[in-house]
Amino acid sequence: MKNIDAFFLTLSLLCCSFAVSCRQGDKDGYVFPKFEKEFAQEFEPVGPELDFNSAYSIHPYGDYLILVAFDAGTSTFLHVWDKKTGEIIQSAVREGRGPGELITRPVVSLVGSECYLYDANAKVTQIYDLDRILQGENGYVGTLLEPVNLFVLGVYHGSEDRAVFFSNESFRQVDSSRVSPRIVLEKGTERYEYDEYPIPDRVRTWWMYNTAYLTISPDFTKMAVVPAFGAILERFDLSEGISLKGADRFIEPDFTLNGANPDFVNHAIPIGFSGFASSSDRIFAGMVAEAVSGQGTRNLEFPFSPMLAVFGWDGRPLMRIRTSVQIDNLAYDETEGVLYAVYRDEDRISHIGKMKIQL
């Protein structure tokens, strides 16, 4: 009898423990990830500090990095950074409204030696030949007039006439004839659409995805998206159309709304990710060390995103590397097995660095 009583007592405690753990887990299924490996490591500086106010993105190209940042002195957006010397050896793509010029910071895709620069304000993509730029030429190839509407934030080009169009429809949009799907994949003459958001609140998702981070695997068969506020890792399969592989919820986007606008004066910003990049089998992200609720008043201290997080394309948290810097941009060079970053030090001065990690 005592053994039977002990069995049922144990079973009862396990059931209670399970129920409590479900209740105590972050509401709506948000759970900060637990990584399989954790350790500390720093980026190795590559060259001198950057003179730009901010860098938008970096991309590996052979012995060089393509750094996208606006240089007010030369009014140029694209800079070729030598990996060995740590110097900018060429700058190109001027600000303006003429052929090959940009109005605003571009979304960048590299296809062979061609650099596609999508201008969300002008709704065009400027194409430049990087090899010609390296030879000291202008490098301008041509302009693509993108068939997009007002709310398309990014166009990402791949080889073999593949492109992804990423939109964030306004919650104030009432003309249904102008509504476009959230994500469109074009593969030659085929067109595929995906029009779901991870949460139903369109006011909230409008603010979350206006400055989202997006990465596409080198073979253009996988894509990941994370918002600016909160941490929801959406993973997509692009191999046979477009389908959601999974949405991993790490930090709730619970920022306080004052009417239709976020209240970041009286409440904290629930930041999750910063820089974002990928390889054929890994996703890399700058990430916060802890979750901060947007319902509270405690803000994250600088550096906001000192953690380098590595995920599998199945969403599994594989590795977390603690650094002492703010990670702003990331790029992975598969030929070297090296992760490059634009980061800010304790004085908020920007640098380019590299890190070799064992995957």
Image (cartoon, grey):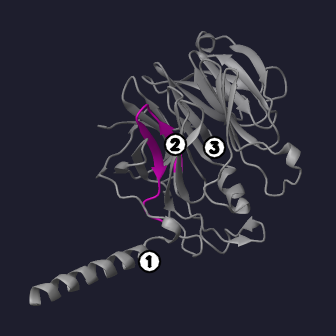
- Sequence order check, earlier mark of 2 and 3: 3
Residue drawn 41% across the image and 27% down it:
334
Q: Position of residue 21 (x, y in %)?
A: 37, 75
Q: Nearer the viewer, residue 164 or 86?
A: 164
Residue 283 forms part of the magenta stretch: yes
Q: CA distance from mark 2 to mark 3?
A: 20 Å
Looking at the image, residue 44 lies above or below residue 250: above
Q: Position of residue 244 (x, y in %)?
A: 55, 44
Q: Main secondary structure of the magenta part?
A: strand
Residue 96 seen in the current view: yes
Q: Nearer the viewer, mark 2 or mark 1?
A: 1
* Residue tagged 2: 276
Residue drawn 46% across the image and 19% down it:
63
Q: Position of residue 68 (x, y in %)?
A: 62, 32
Q: Are marks 2 and 1 in contact (CB under 8 Å)?
A: no
Identify the secondary structure beneath mark 2.
strand
